[in-house]
Amino acid sequence: MAFRELFTPKLVTTLREGYGLSRFRADTLAGLTVAIVALPLSMAIAIASGATPAAGLFTAIVGGFLISAFSGSRYQIGGPAGAFIVLIAASIDRHGFDGLLLATMVAGAILIAVGLLRLGTYIKYIPHPVLVGFTTGIAIIIFASQIRDLIGLQLPGKEPAALLPKLQALTSALGSANPAAIGLSVLTIAIILGLRRYRPTWPGLLIAVTGAAALVWLLQLPVETIGSRFGGIPRSLPAPHLPQVTLDKLIDILPAALSIAVLGGIESLLSAVVADGMSGRRHRSNMELVAQGVANIGSPLFGGICVTGTIARTATNIRAGGLTPVAGMMHALFVLLFMLVAAPLAAYIPLAALAGVLAVVAWNMAEKHAFAAILRHSRADSVVLLATFLLVVFEDLMVGIAVGVVLGSLIFMHRMANIVTVEAGMPSAVVDDDQASEAELDSNGNGRRKGDAFHYKITGPLFFGASTHVATVLERLGPYPHHLVFDLSGVPFADSSAAVALKAVIDKAVHHGATIEIRGAAPAIRMVFAHEGIAGPSVAFRDA
C-alpha cells in the first residue's frame, strides 16, 4: 500500500465516499450518546489520576476531537482512559502536573515517529496473557484508588501510591468513614447496574451521577464534592500554553513519556481492533498512532492529560449508529457544550458518586473469565499471566508489561523450537555415540562410507531457538556418506544462527569428502545461507 494511502485519515476517506444529511444525523446522535457517557467518566478518571476534573474534560474535548479528525479508524473515540490512571498519578507525583504535560507531549512525538516509521503493526504483537494480566492488574489498582472516596475516609496525610501502603493507610482510617458517602456510592453503583440490566439504552452513568448530585443539593449532605475539593469547573477552554522545557527536565520525564507512548499505542490499537470486529471494517494502524500522537501533543496545550482511544466509548459509538469520524468530533463538541452550560451544576457532584462510576469501570475492566480460563488451561501462559499481573499491581506498570512480553516470547520460541523435526533417510547411519568403528573408516581414516548417500528432511522454522536441536541431531551422523542431502522444502524461514549451526555440520562433512545438496530452500533462505558462507563447489542448491 502506498504511503499516501497508509497515512490518509479515515475522515478524508469517508468524506470522499460522499457525506450527506442522513450520515450527519446518525453521527450527531451517536456523538451525543457518547458524550453523555464520556462526561462523568472523563471527570472521574482525571480525579482518580490526581488531576482536576476540568483536565479530564479538556482531554475529552481537545484530545477526543483530534483523535477522531486524524484517526485511522472510522469509529475511534478518544479521551482519558482508566488504564492511564496509575501512570498519570505516578508521573504527577514525581514530576508535578507541568512535568506530566511535557511527558505527554513528548509521548505524542514518539507516537507520531512510530507511526511514520510503520512500526504500528509490531505493537499488536503482545501475548494475550500479558494483556489479561495487565488489564486485571490495572482494575485492581483503580478500585483501590477509589476506596477513600467510596466510603468518605479522611486521611491525616497524603494517600500513598503503592498498593500495600495505601491499603494500610485506608484501614487505619476506617473510623472516619462517612455514612452519607457510602450511601451515595452504593446508590450510584446500584443505579448503573440496574439500568444496564433493565434499561440498557438509558445513559446510566449520567443518570446515576446527576441523581447523586441532586440528593447532595436537596439534602445538603455532608460529603466532599467537586466544588468543595476543586472549586468547580471552568466554563471555557483555557488559552493554549507550553509547559516549561529544559534539557534536564526532558531527560527526567523521558521514562514517563516512553511509558505513556507504549500504553497509549497499545490501548488505541486494541480499541481499533475491537471496532473492526464490531463493524467489519479495517483500520490503518500506523495512521492511528499518528492520530494518537497529534492528540497527545494538542491535549496538554490546553491543560489536558494523556489521551487514547477508549474501547468502551468506541463500542458505544458503534452501537449508537455512528458511521464516520464525525461522530467522534461531535462527541467532543457536545462535551464542550455541556461544560459551557452546566459547569456551575458540576460543583454539586459528590466524589463518592464518581468513585462509584470508577468502581463499575474497574469491575468491567477486570478480565475475570479470561484470567480464570488461562489459569485452568495452560501452565506456561499462567506463568506469563501471573508475572504480569503481580508486577503491575505491586511493582510497576511498564515492568509488568516488559517482563510479560519477554516471558511470552521465550515460551513462544520454546514452542516453535519443539515443532522443528529432522527426519533421517538412512536411520542405520545414525549412531548413539560420536565414534566410528574401525571397520567404518576408509583408508584415510575419515569415517566415510563410499558410494552411499544420506537424506535429511527438516521441517519447521530454522531459527536460533531450534539451531542447537538441529545441530545435535545432525552431528549424530556416524560414518560420513559420499553424498549428503538436506531437504528444506518444509522450512518457512531460517535465521543466521541456524545457518551458522548448519554450516558447521556441512563444513565437517565436506572436510570428510562428502558433497552436499540442499533441496527446496526458498530464495530468502538461500540468501541467508549465502551470507553465512554456505556455498562452494561441494554445495549445490536444487529446487524441491
Image: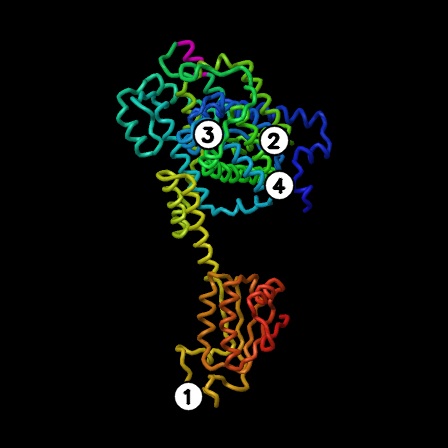
The amino acid beneath tag 3 is Gly
Marks 3 & 2, CB-CB < 8 Å contact? no
> What is the basis of the colouring in this image?
rainbow
Q: Is residue 287 above or below residue 494?
A: above
Marks 1 & 2, CB-CB < 8 Å contact? no
Magenta-colored span:
211-219
Q: Nearer the viewer, residue 457 or 513?
A: 513
Q: Which-is-in-front pick, marks 1 and 2?
A: 1
Question: Dot 3 corresponds to which residue?
Answer: 99
The amino acid beneath tag 4 is Arg
Count of numbered circles on the image: 4
Identify which residue is drawn at 59% across, 40% down.
276
Q: Position of residue 121 (x, y in %)?
A: 57, 46
Which badge, 4 or 2, is on the more N-terminal residue?
A: 2
How far apart marks 1 and 2 lie (CA) works out to 78 Å
Quadrant containing the C terminus is bottom right
Residue found at the far bottom of this picture: 443
Q: Which mark is residue 68?
A: 2
